[in-house]
Image: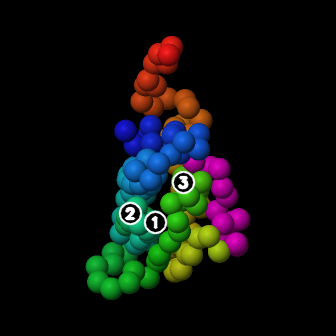
Amino acid sequence: MGRAAVGVWARGEAERKDVTTAVRFTLEELAEVAPGNSVEVRVPPAGAVQAVAGPRHTRGTPPNVVETDPETWLGLATGALAWADVVEDGRVRASGDRSDISHLLPLTAGRRAASGSGGEPKAPVVPG
């Protein structure tokens, strides 16, 4: 379902629920690829995740935070946008020594879903 939502987003056909599902799916993948609690990645209002190995943070604002909007996050997750470009133009706010997660992007499942390769089977086209 998540990979399909990323594909729908990549085709420009996403509704809000698709975007939310795609963001949550890619955030979960990030947490799997880089398990840990030293960086909090926030994509309001869709979701947030703690990832990247290092010092654990448990209270208050974490020292390493990445925050962006859903469209920018999905662009990064799929490889449609480059980290340096979106940080430079202010679409990503990254603070803290460990907040540069460019080496983790794009995410594998996000790339495959956006390109239409692999992942969940596509629904058959029924002549209408």
Position above or below: 99 against 83: below
In the rendered image, which quarter is residue 41 located in? Answer: bottom left
Left or right relative to 54: residue 78:
right
| Element type where label 1 sits in the image | strand
> Closer to the camera, 75 or 20?
20
Amino acid type at mark 3: Leu
Q: Say whether residue 5 is visible.
A: yes
> Closer to the camera, 88 or 45?
45
Q: Say whether residue 22 is visible.
A: no
Q: Which residue is mark 3?
A: 74
Amino acid type at mark 2: Gly
Residue at the front extreme?
Answer: 128
Q: Which residues are magenta?
A: 78-89
Alpha carbon separation for disc pair 3 and 1: 10 Å
Q: Circles 3 and 2: CB distance less than 8 Å?
A: no
Amino acid type at mark 1: Val
Position above or below: 16 against 90: above
At 66% from the left and 55% from the top, the residue drawn is 81
Q: Horizontal and vertical percent for residue 11?
A: 59, 40
At 33% from the left and 78% from the top, the residue drawn is 57
At 46% from the left and 65% from the top, the residue drawn is 43
Q: Horizontal and vertical percent for residue 85?
A: 71, 65
What is the quadrant of the N terminus in the image? top left
Model colouring? rainbow
Q: Circles 2 and 1: CB distance less than 8 Å?
A: yes
